[in-house]
Image (spheres, helix red, strand yellow):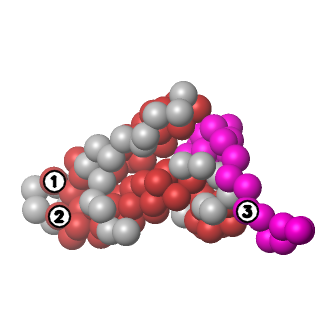
Amino acid sequence: MEVINQKVVRTDNTLLAVAHLTQLLHYVTGFGGFIVPLIIWISSRKTVEGMDEHGKAIINLQLSLLLYIIVSIPAILLIGLGLLGLLGVAILGFVLPIVNAIKAANGEPPSSFLTIPFI
């Protein structure tokens, strides 16, 4: 008897960490911080253990940051509170991917600090 289409799930903590760190492409190139992790997540969510959980955390974080930016821009007119919001988004968008990459490399679940669960 021959087994055809056997799906092997592998543990690859390095790929999980790289997926989190690719979110920082926004700071380097100005774009790609949403597209590249999305491609990594879609292409390997069924073959890498934990990729579905980490991929959802990445997408939820990026969508949450986008929502926070959309809310903060009009809030600039209100005594400049939007500037603090944009500064908070920049700090959160830089620190949380690094924290989650370290957690992924250690095999821990991702942090969902100030992240809205969209998916």
| The disc label shown at residue 75, or none | 2
Disc 1 is placed on an element classified as helix
CA gap, disc 3 and disc 1: 51 Å
Q: In this view of the protein, can residue 79 be seen by the observer? A: yes
Mark 3 — residue?
Answer: 7
Q: Nearer the viewer, residue 95 or 109?
A: 109
Q: Is residue 7 above or below residue 17?
A: below
Picture residue at 39% right of the left edge, 61% below the top = 60
Q: Are marks 1 and 2 in contact (CB under 8 Å)?
A: yes
Query: Earlier along the polypeptide chain: callout 1 or callout 2?
Result: 2
Res 30 quadrant in image: bottom right
Give the secondary structure at mark 3: loop
Please tell me which residue is depicted at 58% across the width and 32% down the height of the picture.
Answer: 105
For label 2, the SS is: helix
Residue position marked by numbered label 1 in the rendering: 81
Q: Quadrant of the C terminus?
A: bottom left
